[in-house]
Amino acid sequence: MRALVFVGAATLGLIVGNTAGSQGSTRELLSIHRVGGNVYMIDPGSEGGGNITVLVGDDALLLVDASGWVDPQPVLKALKGLSDKPVRYVVNTHCHRDHTAGNAAFQAAGATIVAHTNLRRRVEAQKCDGEVALPTLSTDSKLTLHLDNEEVQIIALPAGHTDGDAMVYFKNANVLAAGDAFVSSELPSQSRYAGGNMLGVNEELRRIVELFPNDVKIVPGHGPQSAMSEVRGALKVLDGIRDAVARQVSQGKSFDQLNEMNLLEPWKGVLGEAGPRYLHWYFDFLTGPPDPKYQL
């Protein structure tokens, strides 16, 4: 396996400046902190895409997601603060480029890309966000990797944010990398063009609550590190919205009628300006099948 070349340095626990960008130089900030055991979280900043989870092993690193940068140098500089070992695996949580743009560079340097089988199929069919390096190891259920003393469980999810979602649980460290199945910066949502399903978003959150310990430490797809209480809170809100819409749909109400009912008033403080789109999403998925043009 060819090792990655690490350039520059980062200081663990501090904010690290990096230069990246395909059009000129963009100053970005990455922050790193330990989540649990040998598992760390990298926040790549406002232009760097989704959070990155890093398992530091004796001989190699495993990343969950590869940032939104095609150029890996900002991430490599940050990783240098943790280890000078090569990246052996990159696990993708879904197909969006703000999590997968770095795939190609890591793959070229010797890393194995792991993902949900549907993610690989979407990449092959070019039905997500343009060209993304193709995963070479995939699962449609569960795959377990053993690195040093850590058991890494890659768990495929039902169609929710996309139809190729996966989450990664580091059992010994008790850390879950949730991808965009759960984000702490806002309520989780669906991506219809990538096979997402708003009803499935609820089920993804429910799967997290059911499968993992209450004290699990959660790295969300976006936003600060989280806890199970935040997942339960998001699920309670989304279940409430779904059920409110479903009651009206069962009575034959149209979307325009629902829109006039101020149905989402109980969640106004949580939804903010996002209310109309959640109303629309739940109505659409409760009243008809997904759009076939976005299906694999």
Image (cartoon, rainbow, N blue to C red):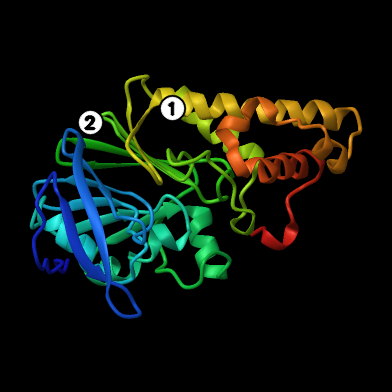
Within 10 angstroms of label 2, few (less than 14), some, or many (20 or more) residues?
A: some
Q: Quadrant of the C terminus?
A: bottom right
Q: Residue 281 occupies which quadrant of the picture?
A: top right
Q: Which residue is mark 1?
A: 230
Gap between marks 1 and 2, in whole Å?
A: 19 Å
Residue 244 lies, in percent from the top left, at: 74, 26
Q: Nearer the viewer, residue 161 or 164?
A: 161
**Does residue 226 appear to the left or right of 245 in the view shown?**
left
Total count of labels:
2
**Which kind of residue does numbered mark 2 sit on?**
Ala
Residue 142 lies, in percent from the top left, at: 42, 40
Q: Is residue 235 above or below residue 127?
A: above
**Does residue 132 appear to the left or right of 169 in the view shown?**
right
Residue 64 lies, in percent from the top left, at: 32, 50
Sequence-first disc among 1 and 2: 2
Q: Which residue is mark 2?
A: 173
Instruction: State which mark lies toward you, 1 or 2.
Output: 1
Mark 2 secondary-structure assignment: loop
What residue is rendered at 61% in x and 44% in y? Answer: 273
**Does residue 122 appear to the left or right of 107 in the view shown?**
right
